[in-house]
Image: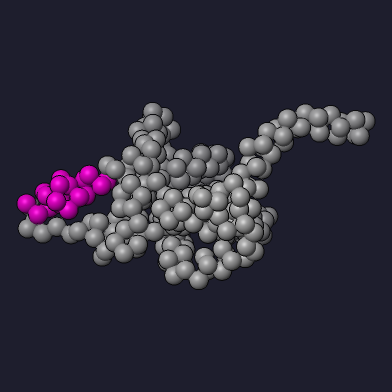
Amino acid sequence: MKQERSVENAVLAGPIVLFLLAILGFPTLLSLVYGFSETTFQTLTTPEFSGLKNFRDVTADPTFWQAAWFSLRFGAITAVLQCALGLALAVYLAPLVRRHGWTVAILIIPMIVAPAMMGLMYRLVLHEFAGPLPHYMYSWFGWSPSFLGPANVFKTLVVAETLQWTPFAFLLFLTAFQSIPDDLREAAAVDGTRPWRLFWKIELPLMMPTVFVALFIRFIDGFRVFDNIYTLVGAGPGGSTTSMSIYIYETFLRRGEIGKAMAAAILLFVSAFVILALAQRLMRRRTP
């Protein structure tokens, strides 16, 4: 009986496996071939095997390490800020959402806007000469910072990313917070537990698996960020806002170094895989 069921499950899973192999398998295989070959747009159909040359070129490129450091900082900082703000909003606004569920639709509006469009909007608003925010700050206070200049561009990008994707963390934490049984809160209230102690001792520990998931998702998303940064400032002053995705894009399309770009993409994939494995192991240790 068990053998028949396993055969039936294999037959049922066959189409989706074949679909994934067709959609993901071929591009992955092609990326591996190009990553280990000397490939340009002229030799795209006839790549020449070059071993680890592309990987040596990538790891010897200072711009690659600058992009990796930017992506690591950007992903970590934005993930922490988004999760901290999302958690605070979820706990603070939970009673309001419980009474008026439609407020969630308003709170997640920034998340609905395409990141590229959000980048263009911030570029318009913060432009040093044409932007309304610098104009009014200079008119009212006689001073306005260069939001997209070398000194402030990283902070501007962090704020823009945090404002757009905090609603995502808010939704996750709101769902986790609302799923906590009311019996626990009522029992704690009967024992005279104060709200702040209730949160730290009961509610937050129950929400920790969701916190880890949210941190991981937002870190990965921030680490591979591309569209909103590219439309807002591109590679930035002196390449200061070049993320890993922007580095791969410019290496591929701007310079035509396809093999080198694929090698960088493979390194990015391996890094994400290692981070995922470490996050899963950490979650298993934390989960009782």
Quick check: 121 above or below 270?
above
Quadrant in which residue 26 is drawn: top right
Q: Is residue 111 above or below residue 34?
A: above
Q: Is residue 235 left or right of residue 223?
A: left
Q: Nearer the viewer, residue 270 or 42?
A: 42
Main SS of the magenta segment?
helix
Q: Position of residue 38 (x, y in %)?
A: 57, 58
Q: How is the image coloured?
A: one colour
Seen from the viewer's position, the closer of residues 44 and 249 is: 44
Image quadrant where one finds the C terminus = bottom right
Residue 117: in sight, yes or no?
yes
Q: Residue at x 46, y 64 (%)?
A: 64
Residue at 64 percent of width and 64 percent of height: 51
What residue lies at 36% left-to-right and 47% top-to-bottom?
228
What's the magenta region? 122-139
Magenta includes 126?
yes
Q: Position of residue 119 (x, y in %)?
A: 32, 45
Q: Is residue 272 visible?
A: no
Image check: 93 left or right of 263? left
Q: Is residue 178 above or below residue 83?
A: above
Quarter of image, res 286: bottom right
Give left or right: position of 267 versus 92: right
Residue 74, how many percent across, how many down? 41, 59
Instruction: Residue 131 in the image: state x and y as whole percent.
Output: 17, 47
Residue ID at (30%, 53%): 233
In front of the other: 176 or 279: 279
